[in-house]
Amino acid sequence: MALTWLTVTGPEGSSAVPETTPQTHVIDYRAAEQLLSARDPRGAVKLLDDVIAAHPENTAARLLRARAFFAAAQLRAAELEFSIVLEREPDNAFAHFALGRTYERRARPGQARRHFRLAAALDPQPEYVAAARFDD
């Protein structure tokens, strides 16, 4: 896949910059996944900002950015992104679980438990069920 280059002329002269295309957004998304795996959540967020600016409806990109915010301990931003994902996909068990973890880290146990229980009800994975603490 070849990138298309634009020449931008400014006060300093001209320089070549890659043109943003749907293909470059896919490349940026995949690179952000790799950065998050390599424990560089801030780098992942930077790449995903452009992807989401171009495709604000892309729930997968928002979920990845929420995970990156969480990993970077930007909990307010993570909470917002997970909430947007859940507005669009209220049956997303992982998003409920991750939002629960976010609330837990923000010392909001009541809200955390609600989302842990929703996650466990939607998908009874052992980790979700343990976090839900149904026995309490």
Image (cartoon, rainbow, N blue to C red):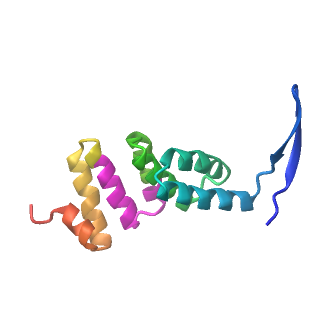
The picture places residue 21, in percent across and down from the top left corner, at 76, 57
Task: Please name the residue shown 42% across and 51% down the image.
Answer: 83
Task: Please name the residue shown 44% across and 42% down the image.
Answer: 77
Quadrant in the picture for residue 100: bottom left
Task: Please name the residue shown 27% across and 70% down the image.
Answer: 121
Quadrant in the picture for residue 134: bottom left
Q: Which residues are magenta?
A: 84-103
Residue furthest front in the image: 38
Give the dominant element type of the magenta stretch: helix, strand or loop: helix
Q: Nearer the viewer, residue 58 or 25?
A: 25
All told, the count of numbered labels is 0
Task: Please name the residue shown 45% across and 56% down the image.
Answer: 87
Residue furthest top in the image: 11
Residue 136 lies, with reference to residue 45, above or below; the image says below
Apparent side of residue 4 relative to residue 114 in the rendered image (left or right): right
Q: Nearer the viewer, residue 107 or 91?
A: 107
The picture places residue 92, in percent across and down from the top left corner, at 41, 66
The picture places residue 125, in percent across and down from the top left corner, at 28, 73
The picture places residue 89, in percent across and down from the top left corner, at 46, 63
Image quarter where the N terminus lies is: bottom right
Apparent side of residue 13 relative to residue 88 in the rendered image (left or right): right
Whether the magenta-drawn stretch holds residue 92 is answered as yes
Q: Nearer the viewer, residue 97 or 72?
A: 72
Image quarter where the C terminus lies is: bottom left
Whether the magenta-drawn stretch holds residue 80 is answered as no
Apparent side of residue 119 relative to residue 34 in the rendered image (left or right): left
Q: Nearer the viewer, residue 121 or 63?
A: 63
